[in-house]
Image (spheres, helix red, strand yellow):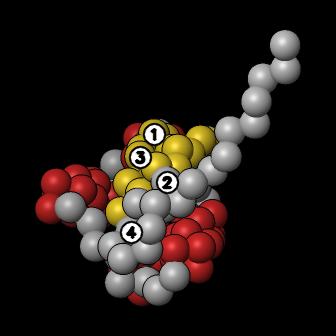
C-alpha cells in the first residue's frame, strides 16, 4: 500500500476510535511517529480497527492491550476515566529513494 494512503487509513482508524493526534514526526519516507491521547476503554477498538488494516502491533503492545481488556471485563470503573498517551511508530517498507524536503534559506 502506498505510504500516503497507509498514513491516511491509520489516521482515520485512530480518529474513529476517539484518539486525538497530538503530534507527529516524519523521518523522510522511511517512518512516521504519531503521538496520541485516547481513553483507555477505547484502546481495544483502536486495535480492532488497525487489525482490519492488517497493521501488526508489537508483542509488548498486544500484551498491554490484553491486560487492559481483562480490566474492562471486570467492570473496573477507573478504566473509563483514564487516558492513555501513546506513540504509534509506522515503518514504511519500500524501495523508493529518500524523500528530500528542501529547507528554505534563512534571510539575513
Q: Is residue 21 left or right of residue 62?
A: right
Disc sitting over residue 85 in the figure: 1
* Residue drawn at point x = 53 percent, y = 60 percent: 99
Query: Mark 4 sits on what residue?
Result: 92
Gap in angstroms between the C-alphas marked 3 and 4: 16 Å
The percent position of residue 50, horizontal first and vertical second, equals: 42, 75
Q: Distance between the residues labelled 1 and 2?
A: 24 Å
Secondary structure of residue under mark 3:
strand
Q: Residue at x 46, y 60 (%)?
A: 98
Asked if marks 1 and 2 touch (Cβ < 8 Å), the reply is no
The residue at the point 55 percent across, 69 percent down is 7
Q: Mark 3 points at which residue?
A: 87
Mark 1 surroundings: few (<14), some (14-19) or many (≥20) residues within 10 A: some
Q: In this view, does 74 lie above or below 102?
A: below
Seen at 33% across and 58% down, the residue is 72
Which residue is denoted by mark 2 in the rendering? 28
Q: Residue furthest top?
A: 108
Q: What is the total number of numbered labels drawn onto the structure image?
A: 4
Q: Is any atom of residue 17 visible in this view?
A: no
- Residue 33 placed where, x, y %? 46, 50
- For the C terminus, the quadrant is top right
Within 10 angstroms of label 3, few (less than 14), some, or many (20 or more) residues? Answer: some
State the residue in front, 83 or 54: 54
4 and 1 marks in contact (CB < 8 Å): no
Sort mark 2 into few (<14), some (14-19) or many (20+) by Cα contacts within 10 Å.
few
Amino acid at each position: 500500500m502506498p505510504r500516503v494512503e497507509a498514513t491516511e487509513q491509520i489516521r482515520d482508524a485512530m480518529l474513529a476510535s476517539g484518539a486525538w493526534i497530538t503530534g507527529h514526526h516524519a523521518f523522510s519516507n522511511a517512518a512516521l511517529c504519531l503521538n496520541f491521547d485516547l481513553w483507555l476503554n477505547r484502546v481495544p477498538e483502536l486495535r480492532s480497527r488497525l487489525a482490519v488494516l492488517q497493521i501488526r502491533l508489537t508483542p509488548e503492545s498486544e500484551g498491554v492491550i490484553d491486560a487492559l481488556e481483562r480490566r474492562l471485563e471486570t467492570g473496573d470503573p477507573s478504566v473509563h476515566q483514564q487516558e492513555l498517551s501513546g506513540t504509534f511508530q509506522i515503518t514504511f517498507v519500500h524501495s523508493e529513494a529518500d524523500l528530500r524536503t528542501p529547507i528554505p534559506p534563512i534571510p539575513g
